Amino acid sequence: MKPNAIVQTAAAFALSMFACDKSAPPAPEAPAAPSASAATAPTETGAVQLSGSSALQPLVNAAKEKYEAEHKGVSIEVSAGGSKKGLTDVASGAVHIGNSDIFAPPDMQGQLVDHRVAVQGFAAMANKGAFDEKVTAISLADMAKVFSGTITNWKQLGGGSQPIVIINRSPNSGTRAVFGSVVLGGDKFIEGQTEDNSGALVAKLKQTVGAISYLALSFADPQLQVIGLKSEAGAAVEPTTANITSGSYPIWSYEHMYTKGQPSAAAKAFLDYMLSPGFQEHVLPTVKGFIPVTQMKISRDKD
Amino acid sequence: MGPTVALAQAEREAGDSRSASPARVGDALVRGFLVACAVFVVLTTVALLGFLARTGIRGAAAVGVGALLTGDIWKPEAGVYGGLALIAGTFISAIAAVFIGAVPAVLASVWLTEFAPRSIRMGYRRVMEIASAVPSVVYGWLALVYLVPLMSGLAHAIRGHDAPVTGEGLASAGLLLGIMIAPTVLLLALDALSRVPGPLREASAAVGASPWQTAFHVSVPYAWRSILVAIFFGFARAAGETMAVQMVIGGARRLPTDLLFSPTTTISAQIVMDMQEARPGSTESDVLFSMALVLLLVSVAVVLVTRGLSRSKQGAR
C-alpha cells in the first residue's frame, strides 16, 4: 500500500471515530472486568507469581530483592489483594503461591500445601490525639465492644470526649479475619467505613480524628496510637515480640504461603530460600513486625 | 513521494479503473478494514449487553429481584445481597450532583451566551474544556485530601461535637460529583444556546424585550430540550462515576445513618470493592453483574429519554 493511501486511511479512520464520538450518546463507564481473568496462568520460565495478603507483602518484598539479586533470570512477581484472594488464586491455578494470614478453609486444605514462613502480630491502631493519649491498653472485652459498636466514644475508654470512628478492612482481608476471630469470635464488626488495603487505611487513620482500626504490626507507625490489651489483672500487655512468642498477647497469626500440591521447581527454590536459616535469622528480623516461626513457644493449628 | 508524482499516479489509476489495479485492491482492503472495525464495535457492544443481561438476570434470579432491590444489608461473604444502600447511594449522590453542579452550569451558560462579552465567553469555554478533561482520580484525590477534612469539620459544627458523623458520606460525594460534571454540562448547554438563531434574539430586542426577557423567554425556551439532554448526561456520568466516589463515600455497606455525613456506598464503588473476591461463575460474581445491570438500565433509560426529547424537537419543526 502506498504511503498516501495509508495516511488517507488513517485520517479517514480517525475522522470517523471522531465523528462517532461527537454524534453518538456517550456510553457510561463500563464496569471493569473481574480481576481474576487478568492473572496469567503459571509458567515454568523462572518467574514465580504470588498474590494475596498485604500484611505479608513487606516480608516477601524483602525476600524478593535479595533472591533476585542472587538468582539472575528469576523474577518474583507479588501482588496484594487480601488473603482470601491469595487462597482463591492459588487454588484456581492463577498464581504459584497464595499468601495468606489465615489458614485455608477446610474445603481447600486437601489440595493446598502450607508453608509457614513467619509469625505476625496484629493490633488495634488509632488516630493520635489528646483524646486517646491515655488509652494505651484496653481489655479484650472493651476491644470487642468498640469494634461491635457498643462503645462509641473515647471517654468510655478513659480518654477525652471524642466519637470513635470505626474503619474496617474489606471482608477479603486476612487482618480482618484474624482480628475478628481473636477479639470478636468471628466477623462481627459493626458496618462502617471500609478500606481495601492496609496502606490506604494507614493514611485514613492519620487523617480522621477519632478513628480506630486494626493492622498488622508491620504497619505500626509513630504517628499512630498502637493500643495494647489489658489482662484480667489489669496489667497492660503490649504487642511486643516477647509477648507474642510467649503467648500472652493473643492477636497473631502464621504467615502462610500456600502452593497447590507440591510447588513447582522455581516456586520451591524461592520457598526454600525464605525458610532457610540465612533468611530466617538474618533478613527476617530486619523487616518490621515479623517473627521467625521457630521462636514461638506456643503453636496453633487453626485461627 | 512528491505531490506531483502522487497526482500523476492518481490520474493513471483513474484511467484504468476497470482493471483490478493495485489501487483498487487497496481501496477494497481499506473498505474491508473499515467494515470490520464497524462490525467489531457493534459486536463488542452486543456481546457486552448480552453477557451482562444473562449473568445479571442469573444473579437476580438466585437472590430474588425483590430482595436484591429492597434489602438493606449487603454482605456477600455471608450470602446476603440487599442492594438498597448501593442503589440509594448512587441515586442520591447523582441527583445531588445535578443540583450542585448541573443546574448552576446551565445558569452560567445562559449568562455566558446572553450577557457576557464574547472575549470572556471564549476564555471561559477554554477553561471549562480543560476542566472537563481532568481525570476523575485527580478530582477524587484532591477531594480526599481537602474536601473530606473540611466536610468533617462542617459535620461536627452542624450536628455537634460528639455526633457520630464523618467527612466521608453523601455530602462529600454529591459535592465532588457536582464539581466534576459541571464543566461537561456547561459545555453542552453552551452549545445548545449557541444554536439559537440570531434573528430570534434580534426580533425579541426589536419588540422591546430586555436582554433578561430575551434570555429567559426566547433563548432558553428555544434550547430547553438540548439543555435537558445536557443535564441528563451529567446525571448519567455522576451515576456511573467510580474512582472518585469510592475515595470519598466511605465504603460502608449500609444506608447512611446521617443523610449527609455518614459513610455509605454506591453501586460502582461496591463493585470495585467486591470484585476481587468474586470468583467468576459464583453467585457473588453474578449478583455484582446484576448491580451493574441496574446501573446500565439507568443509563439506557437516560439515553432513551434523551433520544425521545431530541426526536420530539425535530417533530416540532
Image (cartoon, coloured by chain):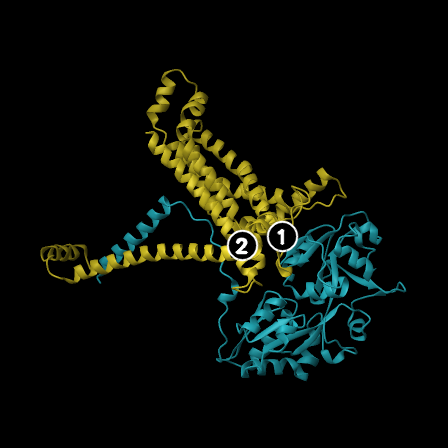
Chain colours: A cyan, B yellow
To the question of a shared chain for discs 2 and 1, the answer is: yes
Q: Earlier in the sequence, mark 2 or mark 1?
A: 2
Task: Say how many tags the image has.
Answer: 2
Give the image location of residue A203, x and y in percent.
Answer: 66, 56
Residue farthest along the right direction in this orientation: A233
Q: Residue furthest top?
A: B208
Coordinates of residue A89 in the picture (x, y in percent): 56, 70
Q: From the top left corner, tell me how far across and down residue A230 is, in percent.
A: 84, 63
Between B34 and A69, which is closer to the camera in this rendering? B34
Which quadrant is home to the C terminus of chain B? top left
- The numbered mark 1 sits on a residue in which chain? B
On screen, residue A102 versus residue A79, left or right, reads: right
Q: Nearer the viewer, residue B308 or B282?
A: B282
Quadrant containing the N terminus of chain B in the rendered view:
bottom left
Residue count near mark 1 (Cα–Cα under 10 Å), binned few <14, some 14–19, many ≥20: many
Provide the residue designation for mark 2: B60
Secondary structure beneath disc 1? loop
Q: Which residue is mark 1?
A: B251
In the image, residue A58 sits, relative to residue B236, either above or below, namely below
Q: Quadrant of residue A171?
A: bottom right
Tell me the CA gap for discs 2 and 1: 23 Å
Q: Is residue A111 above or below residue B29?
A: below
Residue A286 lies, in percent from the top left, at 69, 74
Q: Residues within 10 Å of mark 2 (few under 14, many from 20)?
A: many
Q: Which mark is residue A256?
A: none
**Res. A136 in view:** no
Q: Residue at x 44, y 29 (%)?
A: B116
Look at the numbered disc 2 and give the secondary structure of its residue. helix
Q: Residue at x 49, y 66 (%)?
A: A37
Instruction: Please name the residue shown 74% across and 59% down the image.
Output: A125
Which residue type does callout 1 highlight?
A: Gly
